[in-house]
Amino acid sequence: MSDAEQRAARARKIDPEYKRDLAAAEKRFKTLKAELFAPYLRSWRGPHRRWLDAAMVLLEDGRPAWPSLLGTGGNDGNLDFTNNAMQRLADLFDLAAPDGRPKPPATELLAHSLWNSPAHGLVCGAAIGQFLPGGAGGANSSSGPGGDSHVNPWDFLLMLEGALLFSARSTRRLDPAAANRASAPFAVRAHAAGYSTRGHEKAERGEQWMPLWSHPTSLADLEAMFGEARLQLGRQVAHRPIDVARALSRLGATRGITAFTRFGYLERNGQAKIAVPLGRLGVQARPRARLIDDIAPWLDRLQRLARDQHAPARLVLAEGKLADTVFAALTHDDAPSRWQAVLLAAGSVEALQSSGTAFKAGPLPPLAPEWLAAADDGSVEWRLACALGSAAASYDAMHRPRDPVRHHWLPLQPGGHRYLEEDRRLRRDARVVMMGRDP
């Protein structure tokens, strides 16, 4: 633009009439965009409708939402999945020939894709997007400072065909309370619990748990499985990683699923996403996992407070440590040390609350007596801890404590289920005399 054109553009931006016209145009554009998909959902049938159902879910107010598996409606940044699929078809078949015959490497590459047989002819420099981070190339991906991607075209095509089974439509209908990002099969909200490389990566697109099964099955059975894909906790659908672990510990998955591989959609350079594997969890009954039901609502309240942008770092660390110990207790053996770790991490959270941090979540709820058996390692220290923890001024006919010893550590209401508050902060209680003391 010339200097005169730049001056005219700046003048137009501050012109009230131009601002009014621009606002009206933006409102009209949003209306047209919101009305774009509804006619297609009513009239489309066949393969293109299956793609629409997998790539988009239409909310009650008409706004589109994008399941994370296919990015934002079939693209991730400037990578269009369907355009890339057409290029991979051209790598495998002679599209100029009348019969579209396969090219020489196609058969060898298919065996490589299905059976991991050695093969030549991988495509260098082809985009793979979020689906195969290890083969995407980039810095430190080879013996030199960088390297190109190496992609088997069959892998991308078969992956994209398989993605059609992850239709968001039926899952959304079965669970109307599901979050927009968690409307696809086995998709949940992200939470950095249960893996060791905890960091500050943004995971707005959440996580997705991919099922693994050990027996042959048909396409019809797979479609039925993904159509019913949900992990139940009683009447509630699991929406967080810890909820998924709780559901799997109760054999919450059926149809022959033996394990789940957990993926997180994390952001990399350039705001593109990659699907990072975060571990594998087997479907196995763990009877003591139901003990977490006692503290599940409390964990949810703590997580909401820790996710706040103004949450103090010590709360984020304490909530993360508690979530890790709970996840370990749900996914490993029933060693007493794991259940003791949960109690110790919960005590660290209460220590923060005693100073006024996150006390709105409330104190640790009452626990079932089975916690004593789960955490009992037979040591003298454990018996001493039980004796001190159960101390009270007196007990009623049901052996429930009156004025328990916890009142000397925390400002609690009678019964110990709520904190004493005054002017939206913890009340100074004369009974709390153990502040900052070392046992």
Image (tube, rainbow, N blue to C red):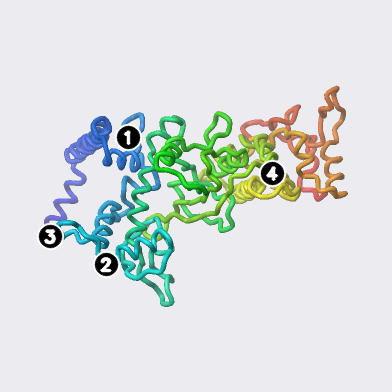
Image quarter where the N terminus lies is bottom left
Which mark is nearer the camera, 3 or 2? 2
Report the amino acid beneath label 3.
Answer: Ser
Which mark is nearer the camera, 2 or 1? 2
Q: Is residue 26 visible?
A: yes
Element assignment for label 4: helix
Neighbourhood count class around disc 1 (C-alpha, 10 Å): few under 14, some 14–19, many 20 upward: some
Earlier along the polypeptide chain: callout 2 or callout 4? 2
Which mark is nearer the camera, 1 or 3? 1
Residue projecting furthest to the bottom: 144
Q: Is residue 420 left or right of residue 307?
A: right
How many angstroms separate mark 2 from mark 1 (CA)? 46 Å
Earlier along the polypeptide chain: callout 1 or callout 3? 3
Q: Which residue is mark 2?
A: 104
Q: Is residue 360 visible?
A: no
Q: Which mark is residue 2?
A: 3
Which residue is at a point 85% across and 32% down the rendered structure image? 392
- Could you tell me if the residues under marks 2 and 1 are in contact, i.e. CB atoms within 8 Å? no
Earlier along the polypeptide chain: callout 1 or callout 4? 1
Q: Is residue 180 above or below residue 135?
A: above
Q: Which residue is mark 1?
A: 63
Earlier along the polypeptide chain: callout 2 or callout 1? 1
Which residue is at a point 26% across and 35% down the rendered structure image? 45
Q: Which mark is residue 346?
A: 4
Q: Is residue 129 above or below residue 254?
A: below
Q: Nearer the viewer, residue 368 or 314?
A: 368
Element assignment for label 1: loop
Q: Is residue 338 left or right of residue 145?
A: right
How many angstroms separate mark 2 from mark 4 (CA)? 62 Å
Earlier along the polypeptide chain: callout 4 or callout 3? 3
- Could you tell me if the residues under marks 4 and 3 are in contact, i.e. CB atoms within 8 Å? no
Which mark is nearer the camera, 1 or 4? 1
